[in-house]
Amino acid sequence: MKWLSEPSPSAVAEALRAVAPELSGLPVDIPDPAGQDDPVWQSSSAALGEEFFVKFAWSEPAARRVLHQIRVLEALTREPAVPYLPQVVASGTDPLIMVTRRVRGASLFTVADTINLDHAGLQIARFLAVLHGEEARRRVEPMTGAVPAWYPLVTTSALRERFGRWVTPGQQREVVRWCDWADEILAEPGPQVLVHGDLHGDNQVWCNGELIAVLDFENAGAGEPEYDLRAFPGPGMGPGLELLTAVTRHYERITGRTLSFERIMAWHLHQALGDVLWRSEAGLSLPDHRAPGEWVTDMAARFRSLGTQFADRRLLQEATAWEARWTWLSRAMPAGLQRNRATSPRWPTSCRRCATRSTSGSAPGAWC
């Protein structure tokens, strides 16, 4: 594997002459590499003429991630292919470069407020259902190894120690409670599947309410399904939590796999507040140009909104369990006692108040 010497049009053109000579004469529009001093991040995607994009790196750590993406896409495009993949036109390792066909459309962040979110959730669920399937993992791991999904999420320890500088004392106390809760929720690992690893809005291309392509597979690897949904609580994913609930509903119907809202929100805590922390410490504005405290307020609102869903799911699970127990007991009990079944409790209801408690009173997801 040989990476580029620098992020310049001439270096890209030279690499193209070796890998895709018919494209080497096209103009290359390279974004400003400012802020990419860390070798880990020294990779870029550049417009190549009007019809293509070219992906390249100019350091070894970044090159390994580009190579990983090439291998992942090569495995996933074999039939039966995972839907919504970008079309790879050319790729090579000496020099390391990948060319994909340009996809016309807009980021999910741009269109989320204007599209049918139930239909959008169905399309995202279809993509994830195939990606998370055992067949996709069996294809990818022989080419990449059994590597975990890679994304440098901020730890809860860092949030406890450093986030308070950017918010009020009361908000920091709430953040610490959330961190304690997230640590408890994620203490045991979930079942592992092949995950995308970085499924935020800018890595999706949409046109007229339809998902056209999912981009950037360089973080793909083993992880739990909920990890891929950590960006969907927002912000920028449409009104409220409609898209998240639509994705989870369709995903569970397609796969038969139950998703945990608690685990999604625990990963979301790492993602959203971690993004606030590193941007604030780096002197960068937040994506929506609001203050860190406003993000904490939004996070609290999302926890409160999901509280009812946590409760409804728990009650449904308890009702199903009680129904199974009652059916077994009914078969075993004398006929006289069976007549009283209509007046017997079908499920416990004493925990509903605790299940819907807001995060200001206790850790989210805490029940009696």
Image (tube, grey):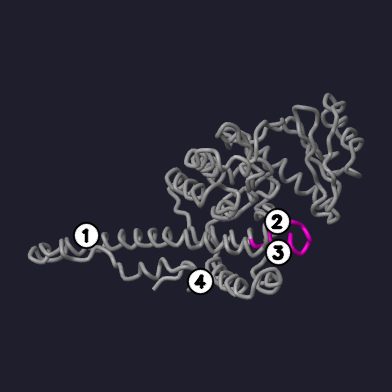
Do the CB atoms of the residues marked 4 and 1 lie less than 8 Å apart? no
Residue under the point 67% across and 41% down:
215
Q: Quadrant of the C terminus?
A: bottom left
The residue to which callout 1 is attached is 327
> Mark 3 or mark 1: which is in front?
3
- Disc marking residue 360: 4
Residue type for callout 4? Ser
Query: CA separation, marks 3 and 4?
Result: 22 Å
In the figure, is residue 86 to the left or right of 39? left
Residue type for callout 3? Leu
Residue type for callout 1? Thr
Query: CA separation, marks 4 and 2?
Result: 25 Å
- The picture places residue 104, in percent across and down from the top left corner, at 67, 31
Q: Secondary structure at mark 3?
A: helix
Do the CB atoms of the residues marked 4 and 2 lie less than 8 Å apart? no
- The picture places residue 184, in percent across and down from the top left corner, at 54, 70
Q: Nearer the viewer, residue 322 or 136?
A: 322
In the figure, is residue 136 to the left or right of 100? left
Residue type for callout 2? Leu
> Mark 4 or mark 1: which is in front?
4
The residue to which callout 3 is attached is 277
Q: Which residues are magenta?
A: 273-286
